[in-house]
Image (spheres, rainbow, N blue to C red):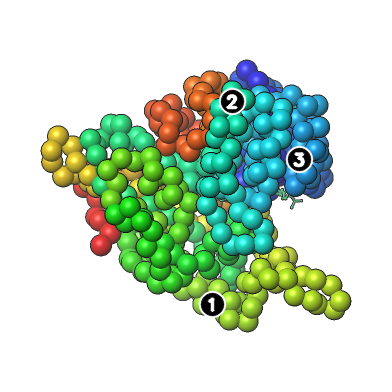
Amino acid sequence: MGKVLIIGCGGVASVAIHKCCQNSSVFEEICIASRTVSKCDALKEKLQGTTSAKITTAQVNADHVDELVALIRKEKPDVVLNLALPYQDLTIMDACLETKTHYVDTANYEPEDTAKFEYSWQWAYREKFEKAGITALLGSGFDPGVTGVFSAYALKHEFDEINYIDILDCNGGDHGYPFATNFNPEINIREVSAKGSYWEDGHWVETEPMEIKREYDFAEVGMKDMYLLHHEEIESLALNIPGIKRIRFFMTFGQSYLTHLKCLENVGMTSIEPIMFEGKEIVPLQFLKAVLPDPASLGPRTKGKTNIGCIFRGKKDGKEKTYYLYNVCDHEECYKEVGSQAVAYTTGVPAMIGAMMIMTGKWNKPGVHNIEEFDPDPFMDALNKWGLPWREDHDPVLVD
Ligand code: NDP
């Protein structure tokens, strides 16, 4: 079918690349380009005997639009799949515009010097992408990503109107370390140490970090504490789901994680303000990232399951109804299949599927769009086929 250029070669990219290789009738050619080309070469070495896809590699600094434009002009991909960090979203979108190439990512833009993420920066490209006749698909991971597809599916098939969405992200995995993060530590800690917020009656309600706690009994995982966080898909779902009254996002954390995080915060290690250290400027959070376990190394140690999904409440044929869509994913099974733990797997699989939707033309809507704006059905079928089967519950326990 075509060629994908994947930018970044970390935990999530590694899974997406494995999956593109399994899906070589769609991804006939895969170019892996990242800052550290040796990681791309090592992955190519591991995978090239296992797939009919042609794999090439390249070095690129995705902070520089000119380097990206030169790479895209040389490789001529049909789709660019951005699996670098949120800091690179805008430069990669600029390069896609200049070369008229479709764009897919998994996380919204975040300026490196401010721990703030929102869609405004990327939505500002809507008209330019529309005029160029190319599609930008934003947020094709699990959350954001599958949670948006679940919402579009629930609206299409189960409800006339959805009024309440609770997104529940549970990681019941245990990697045996007292403290480690399951994806990029810098991005993860910025997210969880920020203030929480939820959408209610047309406006944001802000909370202190980890202020709102609930317990939930997750299928195949059991009872877990979960905390309300701000999360990016709330912003787009609030616009794209008509009749919505409230959207909340909860993530599970164990006590050990929270105690370590509080301690690191209290001593200033999670700060993104640069400080001078032995005559050199360093950012404490970036130094912390360097001493924490690399999330990619957690794969062989992690046991247990993730359970991520959405509980919907709304109306069908004039009656109130509830509906829960979720996926359960086993860390050890993921490791056996692609050498990664389930957090990278549950993000990398939808990233591949999003790129496939654009590559095959199943989704074709020039402009900049969030995932719930597309027909969910082919994506839902692909989740079942490519390793993230979903389950339904028509009578779920609700979160108060
Ligand atoms: P990693 O840190 O493991 O990987 C990031 C990769 O990007 C590395 O290969 C890194 O290169 C590369 N990179 C960083 N900066 C540049 C640059 N300037 N130019 C070129 N390459 C660069 O991160 P993850 O794989 O954990 O996360 C990837 C993305 O997925 C993030 O945006 C994250 O927010 C998102 N994510 C989304 C989720 C969802 O459900 N939607 C869930 C989890 C993550 P190097 O090897 O040199 O450092």
Residue 365 seen from this side: yes
In percent of width and height, residue 202 lies at 33, 52
Which mark identifies residue 386?
none
Say whether residue 182 is left or right of residue 168: right
Give the side of residue 329 with respect to residue 288, left or right: left
Closer to the camera in the image, 133 or 399:
133
Task: Give residue 23's quadrant in the image.
Answer: top right
Residue drawn at x 80%, y 77% is 277
User: What SS does tag 3 mark?
Assistant: helix
Q: Amino acid at mark 3?
A: Val
Q: Which residue is mark 1?
A: 262
In the displayed orientation, state which residue is furthest to the right.
279
Q: Nearer the viewer, residue 88 or 149?
A: 88
Label 2 secondary element: helix
> Nearer the N terminus, badge 2 or badge 3?
3
On the rendered structure, is 57 left or right of 365? Answer: right
What residue is shown at x 56% (from left), y 59% (from top)? 116
